[in-house]
Amino acid sequence: MNYNKKTFCLFAGPIIIAFLMVLVIPLLIGVYYSFTEWNGRMDQVPDFIGLSNYIAIIKDEGFRNAFIFTAKFTVVSVVVINAIGFSLALLVTKKLKISNFMRTIFFMPNLIGGLILGFIWQFIFMGVFQTIGEITGLEFFQGWLADANTGFWGLVIIMVWQMSGYLMIIYIAALQNIPKSLLEAADIDGANGWTKTRHIIFPMVAPAFTISMFLTLANSFKLFDQNLSLTNGGPGGSTEMLALNIYKTAYTFTNYGAAQAKAVVFFLLVASITMVQVYINKKKEVEM
């Protein structure tokens, strides 16, 4: 027994200490700062003000608008990214000569950093699209990122372009684990492609849907760098998402206490929604 305890401490001890120092203690300090008024200067002692920051969040119109915009963006992104990622997985798992090439091409956008990706697409929307619009006279290509509507879809396009290939890999792994005997039995029974997809493939890849929806849900809510580099919340804060709103509260308005309170609310929000999503998806999974 003593040997087991020593072994446990030897291997798990450093991990537990690192977990406490990197995650738990900073989280608790952050929660404490959310009850204070502090401008971030180390020579100033934070003033404890109770729940004032949380009450101010309720009255903060900018935070409410950022939440609504983020929620809409998340719903659209989760649906579109998973639909495209799953479709790409179905495509590249066909016995095509260029399947491996397509896998590489579809996955490559995921290798580009979010800030760089935002600036690349900013050039495409404001430079390439505008030029095409002026040459062809098509209004569709003109004025991208100039209003909340095009800014919203610009962010969705970036997110879809970056994450679809990543989810494709997850769905490929799930599709390749489906027993071929099931599909062969369905073929013998005369099932068409849609019937096999609905009654065999969808239930069998349900665990992959759980993981993929969790990733897209969490990443969409936490989106920051693409939002910063593509629109910076503009025009007029109409495309400002929650993470960017918290960042500006802390570093633009130097109100660290309020920013910490928003971050705590943000954390509870994302954790609650993702846990509900995982619980619902888990209930639909099929045990092998």
Image (cartoon, helix red, strand yellow):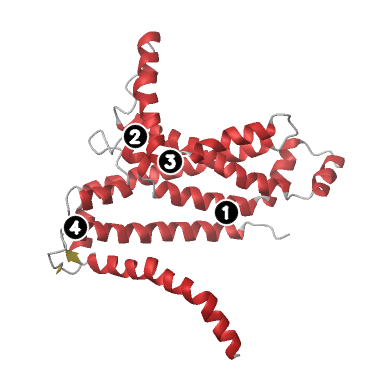
The image quarter containing residue 183 is top right
- Marked residue nearer the N-terminal end (2 or 3): 3
Residue 210, disc: 1
Q: Amino acid at mark 4?
A: Ala
Are the residues flagged by discs 2 and 1 in contact, CB closer than 8 Å?
no
Horizontal placement of 61 versus 152: left or right?
left
Residue pictured at 36% horizontal, 59% vertical: 267
Q: Earlier in the sequence, mark 1 or mark 3?
A: 3
Please rate how many residues cluster around mark 4, counting C-alpha atoms within 10 Å: few if below 14, some from 14 to 19, many from 20.
some
Residue sitting at x 35%, y 20% = 127
Secondary structure found at label 3: loop
List the residue tagged with mark 4. 56
Q: Toward which corner of the image does residue 119 lie, by quadrant? A: top left
Q: Nearer the viewer, residue 39 or 266?
A: 39
Residue contact at pointers 2 and 3, CB within 8 angstroms = no
**Residue 9 horizontal/vertical position (percent):** 52, 81
Which mark, by number, is residue 230?
2
Q: Residue at x 78, y 50 (%)?
A: 179
Name the quadrant of the C terminus. Answer: bottom right
Q: Which residue is mark 3?
A: 113
Residue at mark 2 to residue at mark 3: CA–CA distance: 13 Å
